[in-house]
Amino acid sequence: MLTLFHYDRTSAAQRVRLYLEEKKISWESVIVDTALGDIDQLPKNFYELNPKGLVPVIIDDGIAVPESLVIIEYLEDKYGGDPSLRPKDPKDIAQMRLWIRKIDEGIHVASRTIGVCLVNRHILQKKDQTQVKKYYKEMRDKVRKKNDQINIELGIESPLLEEAIIEFKSLLKDMNDHLKNNEWLSGPSYSLSDIAFVVYLHRLESFMMRPLWKDLKHLDDWYDRICVRPAYKKAIYDWGDITAAQREKNGKEAFPKLLKYWDNA
């Protein structure tokens, strides 16, 4: 059986769970919470599975595949079946890949910046600092490490937070413009690109940020269409979020600052 290393609230793992639930693929869960600043809780061979030491990772037929966007394409290539989650038309496949490129071009980093500035910094500041220093010493993604250190120190005053809000406003506006005349992001059907992006809206909503895009009606309708899918409930809501209360509290407190960044973008 396919094994997924993941934890509840990571957007990258959420998209893999969403794919698996949409395709009704059986899988085994292994929880590895890489956001808690405890390097010692990683499985001993985890850096062999993913050199970055991050989730999600799947083990399928003895092969380890890291990186959520690679994972969902791999699974679609291997399992195919019904429903197909890759567009049929080559121009729609190209559009799907152009959308997905935006994630690696900055949106995922922007998403993490928001999470660290609003919640993770508070969790890490309460932990044993010797443990936290060890966590960052072992972190192999140097950009992630540098950004985290800035965001942990400065919180909502971090200049990277304003950049993240600007990045998201541009993305969400582009999505809304596209969705004016299209039901889905890539072609006539729900696909990998919709799965890839919806987890970010869920993440922003968990920080009480949904009012930021209240005027982007087509985007909002798209989000609601996905949220009512049975697979979405199983992949996202049923796993919960151990930081939900802190996300809500800190998000509400930070909202005036976030709204200012949004309005100035």
Image: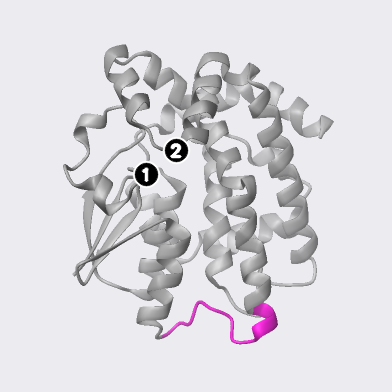
Front residue of 89 and 27:
89
Helix, strand or loop for the magenta stretch, by majority: loop
Q: Does the magenta stretch include residue 170?
A: no
Q: Is mark 1 on a helix, strand or loop?
A: loop
141 horizontally vs 171: left or right:
left
Front residue of 77 and 256:
77
Front residue of 57 and 257:
57
The residue that mark 2 highlights is 141
Percent x, y for residue 12? Answer: 44, 51
Say if 141 sits above or below 156 in the image. Answer: below
The residue that mark 1 highlights is 52
Is tag 1's residue or tag 2's residue first in the polypeptide sequence? Answer: 1
Q: Where does the C terminus fall, quadrant-wise?
A: top right
Q: Residue 190 carries which label?
A: none
143 horizontally vs 16: left or right:
right
Percent x, y for residue 94? Answer: 66, 75
Distance CA(mark 1)–CA(mark 2) = 6 Å
Can you see residue 130? yes
| Residue at position x 35%, y 25% in the image | 137
Percent x, y for residue 76? Answer: 42, 76
Question: Which of the colour schemes (rainbow, by chain, secondary structure, one colour) is used?
Answer: one colour
Say if 125 sits above or below 236 in the image. Answer: above
